[in-house]
Image: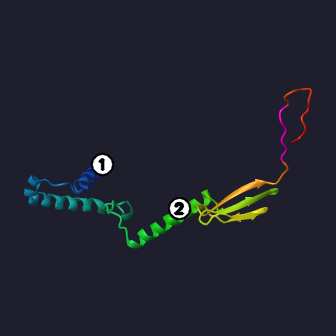
Amino acid sequence: MTTRLKSIVEAIRSRFSSIPKARTASQSDIGDATSSNSAADADSHDEYQREYPPEFQIKSPRLPRISKAMLRNFVVLSGLAAATYAVYQHPPIQTIGRGQVGVRSNLFTGNAAQFREGSVIVIPGIYQLRKYSLQDQLYRPTKANVDHDAPFQ
C-alpha cells in the first residue's frame, strides 16, 4: 500500500511540476538544467500511467478549443433565450374581458383603434392598450346626515 501511495504522491508532484510558471531573468539562465529534469519527470509519469487501465489514467490537461461554429451557436442560442424571456415577460397578446372595451394606441403615429372583448396584439414599445369598463358605475355619497337620504347623482 505504501508503494502505491508513494506513486500517487509522485504523480501529483510531477503533475504540478509540469504546470508552466512565469520565468524570471535568473531562471532563464538555468533553463538547460531544468529541461533535462522535466524530461525525466515526464518519463516517470508515463511509466506510472502505464500501470493502470486507460480509463483510470490521468489525461494531460488541455484547454478547451472554441471554434467559430461553437461561438456562433452560443450567440444564436443566447439570442433565442433572450427573445423567449422577453416574450414571456411582456406577452404580445392581451385579452379584453366581457363588459370592457380596449383602446390600442400606436406610440409612433398616435393612431388609436377600439376593440371589444377578445384578444388584441399589443407589441411592447409600439402599442399601448388601455381597458375601460362598460358596466354601470354608481356614485353613492356618504351620508352626511342620518335624517336625509341623498338620491343617486
Q: Mark on residue 82?
A: 2
Query: Closer to the N terminus: mark 2 or mark 1?
Result: 1
- Which residue is the extreme one toward the bottom? 69
Please state, as top left, top right, bottom left or bottom right, where the C terminus lies in the image.
Answer: top right
Is 111 situated left or right of 75 in this image?
right
Residue of label 1: 5
Q: Is residue 53 above or below residue 139?
A: below
Q: Marks 2 and 1, Cα distance to the nearest angstrom?
A: 51 Å
Residue type of the residue flagged with mark 1:
Leu
User: At 27% across and 59% down in the image, what residue appears?
Assistant: 48
- Is disc 2 placed on a helix, strand or loop? helix
Q: Is residue 93 visible?
A: no
- Residue 53: percent from the left, percent from the top? 36, 63
From the viewer's side, name the closer residue of 77 and 6: 77
From the viewer's side, name the closer residue of 136 and 110: 110
State the extent of the magenta-drawn residues as a range: 137-142
- Which residue is the extreme one toward the top? 146
Q: Can residue 140 be found in the magenta stretch?
A: yes
From the viewer's side, name the closer residue of 131 and 142: 142
User: At 33% across and 59% down in the image, what residue appears?
Assistant: 58
- Residue 41: percent from the left, percent from the top? 20, 58
Splitting the image into 4 quarters, where does residue 70 fall? bottom left
Q: Is residue 13 above or below residue 63?
A: above
Is 45 situated left or right of 96 in this image?
left
From the viewer's side, name the closer residue of 1 and 102: 102
